[in-house]
Image (tube, grey):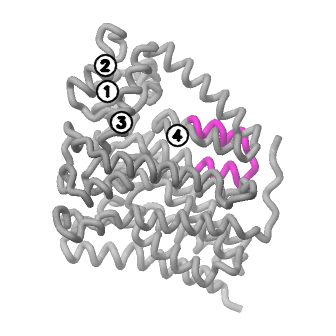
Amino acid sequence: MSVLSPTTRRLALFALTSVLLVSGLLAALGERHALGETRLFLRGVQGVDSWRPMKQAYAIAPAGPVHPLYQRLFFEGRVKFIYPPTALLGFRVLDLTLPERSWPRALNVFSWLCVALSVGASAWILDRSLRLAAPPVSGADRALRVAAATLIGVAFYPLVKAYTLGQLQVLVNACFAALLVCWLLGWRGAAGVLVVGMAAVKPHYGLFLLWGLARREWRFAAFAAGAGLVLASLSLASFGLEDHLDYLRVVAHVGRHGEAYWPNQTLNGFLHRLLGNGESAAWDPHVYPPFHPGVYAGTLAGSAALLGLGLFWPPRTRPRADAVDLAGFGLAVTLASPLAWEHHYGVLLPILAVALGAALERGTWRAAGLPILALCTLIASHHVEALGRLSGTVWNPLQSLLFAAALVLLALLLALRRIPGSRAAPRRVQ
């Protein structure tokens, strides 16, 4: 009897192909590749993409209503600081516990641990999914599965890029991976609290509360609402009401303008580039593309459609609140935003793990679902700098390759919702 199952062999072969072969090919062509970011992650080398403007914002915030934070930094200083005041609570903790010279090191360690948590949680999800759908035939078989999942994770470009940039997105990625783990274990209350961790950085993830109410997941919704009230109270006490109200103007401005730069992998970015509205080849840290009514209308319509599908598909029935449903809604919320940079798609890693297990378990989807998942994973795992050179050409729609892959993955998750799983859902922990 073989010590390795066919499922494990395929997974290991895919991991080696995706990580080593594709990265090697990109390196041979002189392009940036995922393993370059992995090397920086393993060495602990990090930028300050979020940390610098957050530190600037934290220095301004105590000035209060005389000098509103977003008026000074975003509108007058033209610094693209679009985090809500709640995101600055972490800097309040640093201020109260560590000297300022230690902040960079603390943020680096925090970011590194968030990525490690995302990789570990995603590997756990994949291991659990495969044990249910295709049980391992030996201890070595299971160990190789975990090793392959870990390899894919540490070389998953959106995830490690968030770290090397110095992006607070690492917290969102980690919270979402942990959220799916908690859901699979039946820990509804903990899952609700983790949603608030995501919403503290990206408020649109607060829509998970609406998802919980629609699914009648009362414990999840109650913990999310309670934790949200605590977070909002702490933020108001720390930074005052004026800055929170001022933030609404930032949300409106970003919603009206979006971003044309090609790593913005959303419908908004696609429409800007398709219509030639704004600079798509290079990042401008101070200027947003001009307002375009067609882009704005298309973004609103697309966002509404994506959220509607995430909440109400399949029609004429109440979707099961399982991990596939939760993962699908999380992906729909990400896609519905006008801004979703490549590193925001770090949430795809645990989603892909959930989708693979569901496609294997719901056997009618093996033939179609597995090749689709392999292709989506391959596209999501890598950054192809050559796509940036398509700006201003008729080929610029290819710059939205990651967005297209994410849409295909969402379609697969929505299709999987219609097919009952062969395993019972885990018992809820009350």
Marks 2 and 1: in contact by CB < 8 Å? yes
Amino acid beneath label 1: Lys
From the image, which quarter does the C terminus lie in?
A: top right
Going by the numbered disc 4, the residue's amino acid type is Met
Considering every residue shown, the one lying at the far bottom of the view is 1
Q: Which mark is residue 198?
A: 4
Residue contact at pointers 3 and 1, CB within 8 angstroms: no
Q: Position of residue 426 (x, y in %)?
A: 79, 56
Residue labelled with disc 2: 59
Which residue does the numbered mark 3 point to in the structure image?
A: 105
Q: Residues within 10 Å of mark 1 (few under 14, many from 20)?
A: some
Q: Amino acid at mark 2?
A: Ala
C-alpha gap between disc 1 and disc 2:
6 Å
Range of magenta residues:
177-196
86 w.r.t. 341: above or below: above
Of the residues under marks 3 and 1, which one precedes in the sequence? Answer: 1
Question: Alpha-carbon neighbours of circle 3 within 10 Å: few (<14), some, or many (≥20)?
Answer: few
* Quarter occupied by the N terminus: bottom right
| Of callouts 4 and 1, the N-terminal one | 1
Q: CA distance from mark 3 to mark 1?
A: 14 Å
